[in-house]
Image (tube, rainbow, N blue to C red):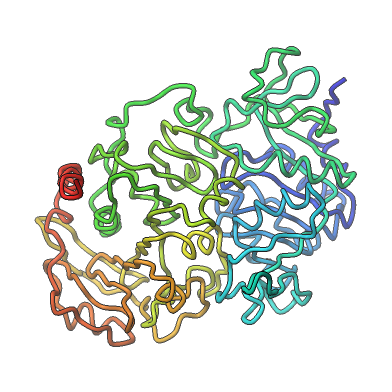
Amino acid sequence: MVSFITPDEAAALVRDGDILVVGGNGGTGVPETVLESLEKRFLAEAHPAGLTLLHVTGIGAVTEKGLCQLAHENLVTRVFGSNFGLQLPFMKLIVEEHMEGYNFPQGVMTQMFRAMAAKQPGVVTHVGLHTYIDPRQEGGRMNARTRTPMIELVELADREWLFYRAPTPNIAFLRGTSVDEDGYVSMEHEATTREDLSIAQAVHNAGGTVVCQVKRQVKRGTLNPQLVKIPGFLIDHFVLAPDQMQTYTTAYDPSRSGETRMPISALKPDPLTEKRVIARRAALALRPGDVVNLGVGISAMIPNVVAEEGIEDIMTLTVEAGVIGGVPGYAREFGTAYNPRAIIDQPYQFDFYDGGGLTCAFLSFAEVDGDGNVNVTRFGDRYDGAGGFIDITQNARRLVFSGTLTGGGLDIAVGDGRLTIRREGKFRKFVPAVGQVSFNGRLAREKGQDVTFVSERAVFRLEGDGLVLTEIAPGVRLQEDILDQISFAPRISRDLRLMDAKLFMEGPMGLGGMLAATIGATR
């Protein structure tokens, strides 16, 4: 018999000192109803306390929902995760030293649950070498309170590797769509399938308790076995939540789970702002046949450009959560896609990424220095963590980093084929030395990676001697608007040219024609 319990009963299963895994990815697959009850119990009883929390990547809606509900001192005292940018109240507790924090790359976190399931001691990988994850730098420890090393430098087969130690979880909160009378769980309404199977296997094999929140119960034998993601013998209890949302903004969109397809032409182009200009210029790096990853921030706006240009079928766009093909969403829909061609479990997506399968990846930057090092993980009073950034940037063949040249109050007008700076940003992003090495420019040069930095007013290439300025926007001044806003002296290309005026105009740029010309030129 399937055991159905209430959300409050699920929360009561968590004991002081437990090692809890919470499934979900951004705003998808989050067992929200159970998390609400866990917070309610803690506020009423001050228990459970002293939890160790494991989660793969940011879970929440920035200041509410998800793990934001666990942002209470003493509820969680140690956390392992890859990104905290969608759970700012939780991040604040780490920054203020109220809990220990370990930041592992997203791919490592998701692959670690497979290692736990097989009772392996952890994950050995090249991902993270020569970044702040490397124990020769910070070892992924997020604050002074975090002292115990969990990442070791090891040598195997005449190479350096990083060994990430795996904790042993004893309780998990997961989510699916349907459960049958034998406890088999399908995910037909989910936009991602994440690593929930591996988590269930890991906790079950450790003798722990697995709780799965689901939308509905169905009869035995009515589920398509190809849609079943977690066998019933791995799950101890179920919580029914008929109103669970597909994402934090969408109740259910069948085009995100593959049930139907939507006309991509129905997507409205984003407003023509400096961010739209950056996304358009970055999109010029796309090539026919590319297999592409798209990161958060401005890079997540590139699919909207692809949709406007009608070129979504010329290359394959992917996101870390396991979505392949279609047009990825952004903001609270990040991690999903309209009309995906495949949805695979996240560990397998990162196997492909870590093995160098991506031809091109688009990511954001917060700081860049003259050697091409990039910081996206720690700046100001924020410690967002890596997410999939390190896995992707250390292994993709071509990289395009995007961001505005300056930040803090920047005011720009775009139109008529040119850019006008009405008010300069208060702080510089191109700095003498980055605050934390999330991407190592020297290592990228040694590997021969093709690296471009795109801003609204300038484009740079990473070459053997560092950053080289290759393009400037129509309407800006080279010295005052670019060179004076950079804290180092980039080399200026002899072939310095203007960015294409079409980037600064309303309407499609004709990118499909440009790519068709590329196809013809390569035949």
Percent from the top left, x then y, of residue 449?
Answer: 39, 67
Q: Residue at x 40, y 86 (%)?
A: 432
The residue lying furthest to the front in this view is 157
Q: Residue at x 38, y 70 (%)?
A: 448
Which of the two residues, 164 or 417, is positioned nearer the viewer here? Answer: 164
The residue lying furthest to the left in this view is 416
Q: In this view, does 502 lie to the left or right of 140?
A: left
Percent from the top left, x then y, of residue 460?
Answer: 27, 72
Which of the two residues, 50 or 503, is positioned nearer the viewer here? Answer: 503
Percent from the top left, x then y, of residue 430?
Answer: 36, 78
Q: Is residue 45 left or right of residue 157?
A: right
Q: In this view, does 302 lie to the left or right of 192?
A: left
Q: Which residue is drawn at 65% across and 51% down?
A: 110
Q: Can you say which quadrant of the picture contains the N terminus?
A: top right
Q: Is residue 266 above or below residue 208?
A: above
Percent from the top left, x then y, of residue 352?
Answer: 52, 50
Q: Is any part of residue 202 visible from this angle?
A: yes
- The number of numbered badges drawn on the structure is 0
Q: Is residue 88 above or below residue 179?
A: below
Q: In this view, does 466 lie above or below 254?
A: below
Location of residue 16 (image quadrant): bottom right
Q: Is any part of residue 95 visible from this angle?
A: no
